[in-house]
Amino acid sequence: FNWPETRGYKLEADVRAYVQDLDVNYDLVLIVGIGGSYLGTRAVTEALLHSYQGLVKSHHPLVAYAGHHISETQLIEILELMEKRLPLINVISKSGTTTEPAVAFRILRSYMEQRFGKEETARRIVCTTDGNAGALRQLAKEEGYKTFSIPDDVGGRFSVLTAVGLVPLALLKLDTRALLDGASEVFADLSEGEDHPAIRYAALRSAANQLGKSVELLATNNPKLSYIVEWWKQLFGESEGKEGKGLFPAGLVYTTDLHSLGQYVQDGNRTFLETFLSFHNDSPRRNGVEQQVRVPPMAQKIDGLNHLEGKLLSEINQAAMLGTMLAHTDGGCPSIALEWPVLNEYNLGSLFAFFESACAMSGGLLGVNPYDQPGVEAYKKNLFALTGKPGTESLRAKLKERL
């Protein structure tokens, strides 16, 4: 909880200095990682950067992601994108042996060396990895790649405020100092005790669990916040899903999902707690000017929506969110409302610190260790066996019998 003051601000200054001193031009930042190695960063970029980046003019480099799946199709598309751009790669992996990012990085590194040669490729790759050991640390040392360390005492899903998030966000010219400032304020205010919103949120989740709820829905009314939901799903899913315990974290984007899952949330099995996440002002700014859209008048009054003429879309969206919350509450689905003032780096830092603090306390109330994830190893063992890793022959034979 004292990360920003004890290490974060010093690291952030070092990262900014690295970005300022880069001796290569780049207009594409390719982030290679999976889970906590990329979800926090993607939550920020999806929320703050233009949805159609690359098609509109921007002072931010283009961002793309790889290594969070094993899809051949998407990696081919990434390689095609790289052909049109000047790429810089940030590969993020504590061990360097996680299958998805390690395989992707092999392919991308080979492409870079063929295009730029080994010397320039070394200047176009930065590794965020274990500070002392591991395959990626060894490779970086051999090839001369710039490195930043992932701290030993911060788990992947809690790591967005470390070099895991600060390096790619600084490369994308986002305000990493403000991100830490927002987090620092939340951490400092934990001394408020039970009045702190994160503590209240953890207590409400615990109460819902005790009342028999088994699923928490995190709903937002802005599709640009969808990767905050994805980050939250990993944070709580890996932290609490142990020993047959924990609320299953699921996400919804309204109003879109009201036309698919809304019926179930309203009238289906009463297993849900629903948390509504929003920003009071999430309108984008262009050249310092807030952009807003009003519903225009229409000569033909045939759609039955005359009462919306002149209203801001943000006002209508907020009304839909409040109406949904009340309807679902009336249907027997208890709800929590979480709102931040403005969608920017400062408040995203606040959001990360809020959920990380709440998750730690919620795990404690549940009686599980929120910092380990023993269950994620099961599929990896099967994957290694099915792909022929030496030493897994016996397991591979047993799995083949079952398939």
Image (tube, grey):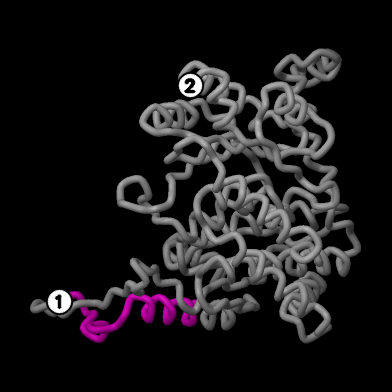
In the rendered structure, which segment of residues is drawn in magenta? 303-324
- The residue where tag 2 is placed is 116
Q: What residue is at 79 percent from the left and 38 percent from the top?
A: 130
Q: What residue is at 74 percent from the left and 64 percent from the top?
A: 4
Q: Is residue 367 visible?
A: yes
- The residue where tag 1 is placed is 302
Q: What residue is at 74 percent from the left and 62 percent from the top?
A: 247
* Horizontal and vertical percent position of residue 7: 78, 58
* Horizontal and vertical percent position of residue 114: 49, 16
The foreground one among 214 and 20 is: 20
Q: Is residue 260 found inside the magenta-colored segment of the image?
A: no
Question: Quadrant of the rendered structure where residue 267 is?
Answer: bottom right
Numbered disc 2: secondary structure: helix
Distance between mark 2 and mark 1 Cα atoms: 60 Å
Q: Is residue 56 above or below residue 108?
A: below
Q: Residue furthest right?
A: 367
Q: Residue furthest left?
A: 299
- Quadrant of the snapshot with the C terminus: top right
In the image, is 329 to the left or to the right of 354? Answer: left
* Horizontal and vertical percent position of residue 350: 65, 70
Which kind of residue does numbered mark 2 sit on? Phe
Q: Is residue 5 above or below residue 207?
A: above
